[in-house]
Amino acid sequence: MLKGRIIKALSGFYYVLSDGKITQCRGRGVFRKQKVSPLVGDYVTFQAENELEGYILDIEERKNELIRPPIANVDQAVLVFSAIEPEFSPLLLDRFLVLVEANGIKPLICISKIDLVSDEKRPGIEKYAQDYRNIGYDVLLTSTITEDGISDLLPYLNECVTVVAGQSGVGKSSLLNALKPELELKTNDISASLGRGKHTTRHVELISVGTGLVADTPGFSSLEFINIELEDLSTCFPEMDRLSENCKFRGCLHLSEPKCAVKSALEEGDIPPYRYEHYTSFIEEIKQRKPRY
C-alpha cells in the first residue's frame, strides 16, 4: 500500500502525490456507502498498478475541511478582496473570516488592485486595512500591475498549505500568476453588466509555490454558516473573543446583556462599528437558519 496527498480532483479522478510522483486514482465504492468523498488536501492510502490506474483505499482523519471550495487540511487562507472592481466589501470579508476562523485556519487578508484606487478613495481603504491589523490580522495591499506587496506575500506561503479564496473577479489567479508566472492561470475581466468577475478556475488544485502548496479555487460570492452555532460566533471575531472573558455573564452573546465587555468596547470606539453590525447580522442569520435533521 502507498501513502500520499491528493493534489487535484477533476472529473471523478483524484491525482495523488507520493514520493514525487503523481498517480491518477479513483475512489473505491466504499466511500459512497460511507457518504465520504475524497478531497484535495486529503492524506490517503492507495494502491496502483501504474501511474494511470490507482485506487484510493482509505482517507486519514482531517484536521479541517471546507465545503466551498472543497478542500481539506488547510493551514492558511489568503482572502483576496479587491480595493475596487468589484468594490471592497468588509461585510463579505467578515463572512470569509468567520468561516476560516471556525475551521481553525489562519487568515491573511490581501487587498488587491490597489493601483486602481483614486487618491480620494485610498484613505478609506487604508483605514480598513489598519482596522483589521488592529484586530490582529496580517493585511497586505497588493497590485499585480505595479507588483506592490507581491514580494511580501511569498514568505507567507512557505512550508504550509494555503487556500486562495475570495469573490469572483478580485484577481486570485492574477496574484498566483504574479507569484509564479509559469503557471499561466486563466484570468478574466469583470463583467460590466454584473459588476463581478466571471469564474475562471473550474477545479481545486494544489500548486507548488515557494516551499509551500497553494490552492487556486473557484470564485464564489456567498457563504452560509452551516456548522456555526450562536454561542460560537463571537469566538470567530478575535477582538470579541478576547474581551468576552470580562463579560459579567458566561455565554454572553454581546447583544443586550448587562455589563458586557464587548458592548463597552464598542461604545468606547475600540471595536469598529461595522464589525459589530456584521456580528449582529450574522447572529440573526444563524437564528433564522432552518434546523438540520
Image: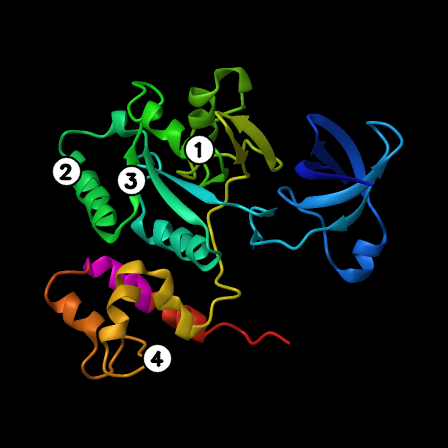
Horizontal placement of 170 versus 52: left or right?
Answer: left
Residue at image mark 1: 157
**Distance Cα–Cα, label 1 vs label 3:** 14 Å
Above or below residue 121? Residue 226 is below
Residue 279 among magenta residues: yes
Q: Amino acid at mark 1?
A: Leu
Residue at image mark 2: 123
Residue at image mark 3: 139
Q: Secondary structure at mark 2?
A: helix
Q: Are marks 2 and 1 in contact (CB under 8 Å)?
A: no
Residue at image mark 4: 251
**Distance Cα–Cα, label 4 vs label 3:** 30 Å
Q: Quadrant of the C terminus?
A: bottom right
Horizontal placement of 187 versus 270: left or right?
Answer: right
Between disc 1 and disc 3, whose residue precedes?
A: 3
Please report the bounds of the magenta region as a residue range.
272-280
Q: Give the residue displayed 21% in from the left and 39% down from the top.
A: 125
Q: Amino acid at mark 3?
A: Val
